[in-house]
Every structure is written in C-alpha cells, then in structure tokens.
Image (cartoon, coloured by chain):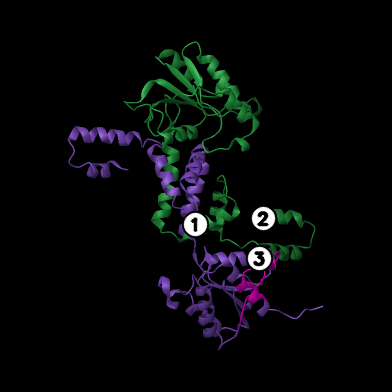
Chain colours: A green, B purple
Amino acid sequence: MSAQSADIYFYGFKHEVTLKLLTLLHASSVLYTRPLANLIEQLQRLPGVGAKTAQRLSLHILKRPTEEVEALANALIQAKQQVGSCTICGHLSAEPICEICAHPSRDNSVICVVADSRDLIALEKTREYRGKYHVLGGLISPMDGISPEQLNIQSLVRRVSGNKVAEVIMAIAPSVEGETTTLYVGGLLRPFTKVTRIAFGIPMGGDLEYADEVTLAKAIEGRRELDF
Amino acid sequence: MSAQSADIYFYGFKHEVTLKLLTLLHASSVLYTRPLANLIEQLQRLPGVGAKTAQRLSLHILKRPTEEVEALANALIQAKQQVGSCTICGHLSAEPICEICAHPSRDNSVICVVADSRDLIALEKTREYRGKYHVLGGLISPMDGISPEQLNIQSLVRRVSGNKVAEVIMAIAPSVEGETTTLYVGGLLRPFTKVTRIAFGIPMGGDLEYADEVTLAKAIEGRRELDF
C-alpha cells in the first residue's frame, strides 16, 4: 500500500492521526530496500516468476560479483537490440537472413511452417529435419482479434509461388486456432505445391489407456501400413 | 562447441576436411542466434533456471517492449550498485543505516539474530516482531572454512555490550552449523544480556504422525504449561 492510497483511505482523520497511521504502514513496508524492491518487481514480470522466486533470484543476484550482474544486464539489452526477424522466414535472427535460411546445405525445396520460433527451435533439436522453415508469428484467432493479415502468411505465399518448393509441411499444434491456421494457409498454398501436415497420435512412451479420445481417434485415422 | 575447441579437436585432419566438419558442427549449433544464445547462457546462471526455463524467459523477453527490457536491466545494475549492508545490523540496505535500524518506533532493547537477510525478511513478514535485528551473514562452518571472524559477530558483541539490550533472540535454524553458531554467539553475549532462542516443534497444521523424531523430541522438550 503506497502512502498515496493511504492518504486517500484515511482522508477525514485528524492530521496527527493520519501521520501516525502512515508511519505504521511505512513500518510494515520496509521489507526490501528500494532498489531491491524494484528488482523484485521487475523480475516478477517474467512468466512463471512469482513473488517468492523473484525474491530468491534478487537476493542471489545481490551476492554475485558486479561483472556477472552487468553481463546479464548487457545480455538482456543486446538481445533486445540485436535480435530481429529473418527477412525470409521470420525466425529470430541477429542478421537480416537467419543462419538456417543462409545455410548452403539445407534443402530449399521443403518448407516447414510453424506458429512460433519456439516451435522451430523444438523441431531443430530433433536434428531430423534438414529443410527450411517459415515462422508465422502466431495463429489466426478471431477471438483475440488476430487476422491472417497480421501473420507472416503473405511472405510465405510469395516464397512458395516464386520458388521451386516441392513440399510445405504444416507443423502446427491441433488447437482450434491451429486447425484454422493450418487449413487457411494450406488452402492458399495448394495451387503451388504439395501441402502435408505432421502426424498426430500417441506420443512415444505414451499409454493408450491414458490417451484422450481425440488423440486416439487421430491415431487411428492416421494409421499406416506396417513396413517390414 | 565453439569453432575454437573444434579447431583443436580436429587438429591433424586435412584442412578441407576440418572445414567441412566445422560447417557440420556449425549447422548443428544454429538453434539460437548469437545474442539470444548469450542471453540464455546468462539466465542459466540464476538458481533454479535450467536450459528450458532460460529459453522460455529469453523468448518472452524478446517479445516485450524495449523499455520493459531496459527497466529490468537497469533494475539489475542499480540493485547491485546501490544495495550494501546496514552499518549497524548488516541487513541489505541502500542507505548506510537500514530502515529498520533507523525506525523510531521499533524496540531497541531486543535484538533478533539471524543468519541471513532472507531470514530477516521472513520474520518481518509475520509482523509479530517489533524489535531490531542483527544479520550474521552466514553460519560458522569449519567444513566450508567459515570461521566466526568472517561473520558479523564482533559488531553484534559491541552492539550488545555497549547498549542497553534486554534480550537477544537467536533465530537460527537447527542444523549442525546453526547449533554451533547459536551456542557460540549465545556464549559471547551471555555476560551482557538475556539470550533466548526461537521454539522448535511441530509446525502449525503439521501432523504428529509425520513429524520426524528429532522434531517431536524438541516439541516435548519445549513444552509449556497450558494457559487458560
């Protein structure tokens, strides 16, 4: 509770009483010295960081050498300043063209479409895919006011229609927005190339018993002939 | 793996081969553009932040407005620059004397001794205690090479012997190091004042059935007469 709001709350009390109450309120808010309180507040804006974690991180940071704290602060500012989007695929990149698009030995004829750089990174970690990517930057969502124009879709259509692309793989998770986006983008691209989508089914190590019905239905629908 | 270490590792290969191998290594390390990789690396140095959390936080940070990222970076540097120790009690403070020590209405005659500012903050949150504190800055631990001289103990003895202190409450958790510290500091202060310690026993809402034997023994040992 700030002194400001206390002022309003105690409006009408005698001045001396108000002052005393303010002192008491102040007494109960001296938990953190100001710069520390500010750091805790800033850290709490990060996802998954609550009051307790923010306090723990802050007290840890105060104990680290100055160089280490400065290195973190600089990393924050430099990442924000230097990282933009690849002009070809929309992936996070410090250069105008990202390292995947610029890579000489990756297959130009296959483009994998993802909602977000996060998904691209997850796919890259499998080391299975050697084609290129296209990052939409979100999903079509009329509920949240996100229309196709706000996404990186036009550049994808230009990219596919202007180059020899043998296949576009839609790699978008099957939510309502995901399905909408997959069908919309797929429809736009179908005149120019083959459009496929990743398989949905039982995850490896998963249990049929515990899989939800939609996943099971998708797994049956997506069945393939056994190859010996 | 950096190009540097790869260079050494492949020392002896033909130059062309080395170049090809470096290209392959490079291909598998383009997950993150450099400033992003650096931010992830810096965040991973924080306690409880692993590779996944660091990636999640970094991608979140890149999406935030520049002002917000700068506010966080500045909060880090300012907290580190401005927050030192209170010259009286050793608590974290941006001023030479912390807000608790400087507070006019807190009881000067009782000093609560804690290992760390973290413990002080936890006690302050109860709003039960209106005396002063003394932060030792750690526990005596011969195993870790921490001797009494490295802790904020001498200033405590001066503080207690030079002022009218009616009671010193030792509020240190009962580990081996905690007990050593409590007994050592308590012994030094006994000539000057009454020394007490916080109660150990069954936590509120705790179950006797699930309490360990040492806690149960402490709870019986610390029993008090019922007051009606």
Q: Nearer the viewer, residue B222 or A33?
A: B222
Across and down, in percent, residue A175 comes to: 61, 29
Q: Position of residue A161 (x, y in %)?
A: 45, 13
Closer to the chain start, of discs 3 and 1, is 1
Residue of label 2: A2
The amino acid type of the residue labelled 1 equals: Ala
Give amino acid for label 3: Tyr
Front-lying residue, B11 or B183:
B11
Callout 2 crowding tier (Cα within 10 Å): few <14, some 14–19, many ≥20: few
In the image, the segment drawn in magenta is B195-219
Specify whether disc 3 shares its chain with disc 1.
yes
Say if B100 sits above or below B20 in the image. Answer: below
Tell me, yes or no, if residue A159 can be seen here. Answer: no
The reply to whether residue B100 is visible in this rendering is yes
Q: Are marks 3 and 1 in contact (CB under 8 Å)?
A: no
Q: Name the residue at 52% across, 65% down.
A: B92
Report the residue at 37% width, 35% height from top: B30
| Residue identified by numbered label 3 | B210
Work out whether disc 1 and disc 2 sit on a shared chain.
no
**The C terminus of chain B, quarter of image:** bottom right
Q: Is residue A133 left or right of residue A2?
A: left
Q: Nearer the viewer, mark 1 or mark 2?
A: 1
* Helix, strand or loop under label 2: loop
Q: Is residue B112 above or below residue A184?
A: below
Give coordinates of residue A167: x percent, y percent: 44, 18
Image location of residue A30, percent across then percent down: 61, 63
**Location of residue B170 by image quarter:** bottom right
